[in-house]
Amino acid sequence: MSHPHAPAAQGPQHLPGIRHILAVGSGKGGVGKTTVAVNLAVALSKLGHRVGLIDADIYGPNVPTMLGATRSPSIVDGNLMEPILAHGVRFISIGLISPGDKPMIMRGPMLHQIIRQFLQQVAWGELDDLIIDLPPGTGDVVISLVQTVPLSGAVVVSTGSAVALEDARKAIEMFHQVNVPVIGLVENMSQMTLPDGSIVDVFGAGGTEQTARRFNLPFLGSVDLDPQIRTGGDSGLPAALAGSATARGKEFLAIAEKIATSTQELAAKDGVVLEIS
């Protein structure tokens, strides 16, 4: 039975002052999705963008450690949380609110509420890019996102291994099903250069680029397996901070430049209303 006076269901709502909202996802865990998301946020900031980062990986909130900032957010005017600023990036994470080793045990509706709060009840201010580090897989958080805000696009991270790419293809199809354009694919831990200059192919370098071609999607670039990326994440000094002074910094900057170009091109096109199909 219809109710003529019932309020119409609201679709995704734009966030005032934020130009682009970008999701970084992966089909499975362990491929370095958060490492890539954090370093891309820092790289975009080094390119002069105003950048925010939401740690939406509720069960594994590693962004505070990787950005080297773990203090609790303050409450400012309007009962909004103030994001933490680190390395030019404003960010928010459940790890700031519930720090330590206590696990987050919650079901779908609670996840949805947290995502809405991180999007709508944080004083983000003016941003060029708001990056959302998704949990691995194809679960509730993505649905909550596309029901809440219009995503400008998504970046899928994978290694080159057949197992990782099998799940990356699921992530690509997930974004297609919810009408979120996939900006492109990034291959993480692509290959490793030893001190003597020899190269070790650990996870199947080149497999992600082949998958991008198969899906007619841009290949945004690869990041080699390098202990400096791990130590940077553990110490709160992401590798992208080095900019063009290091090989890994150059890789992240090059990927960030491609993403910035793609988001500008997508924004120039007519907007599409996102719906769950």
Image: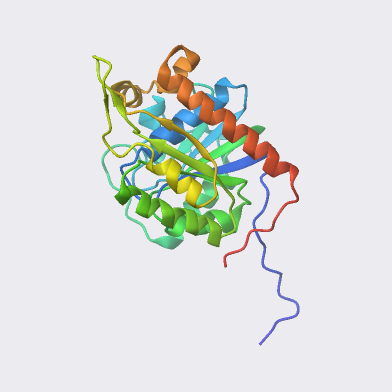
Question: Please, which residue is most extreme toward the top here?
Answer: 245
- Taking the spot 33% from the left edge, 48% from the top edge, the residue there is 164
Q: On the rendered structure, is 129 left or right of 252?
A: right
Question: Please, which residue is most extreme toward the bottom here?
Answer: 1
- Can residue 111 be seen here? The reply is no
State how the image is colored: rainbow
Question: Which percent across, then down, holds residue 147?
Answer: 58, 59
Q: 11 or 42: which is nearer to us? A: 42
Q: Quadrant of residue 94?
A: top left
Question: Which percent across, then down, holds residue 243?
Answer: 49, 17
- Taking the spot 35% from the left edge, 26% from the top edge, the residue there is 233
How many marks overall? 0
Which quarter of the rendered picture does the N terminus lie within? bottom right
- Can residue 276 be seen here? The reply is yes
Identify whether 178 is placed above or below 40: below
- Taking the spot 52% from the left edge, 30% from the top edge, the residue there is 255
Identify whether 273 is placed above or below 228: below
Which quarter of the rendered picture does the C terminus lie within? bottom right
Question: Which percent across, then down, holds residue 37?
Answer: 46, 35
Q: 112 or 244: which is nearer to us? A: 244
Question: Which percent across, then down, holds residue 123?
Answer: 60, 36
- Taking the spot 41% from the left edge, 22% from the top edge, the residue there is 248
Q: On the rendered structure, is 249 left or right of 193?
A: right
Identify whether 262 is placed above or below 228: below
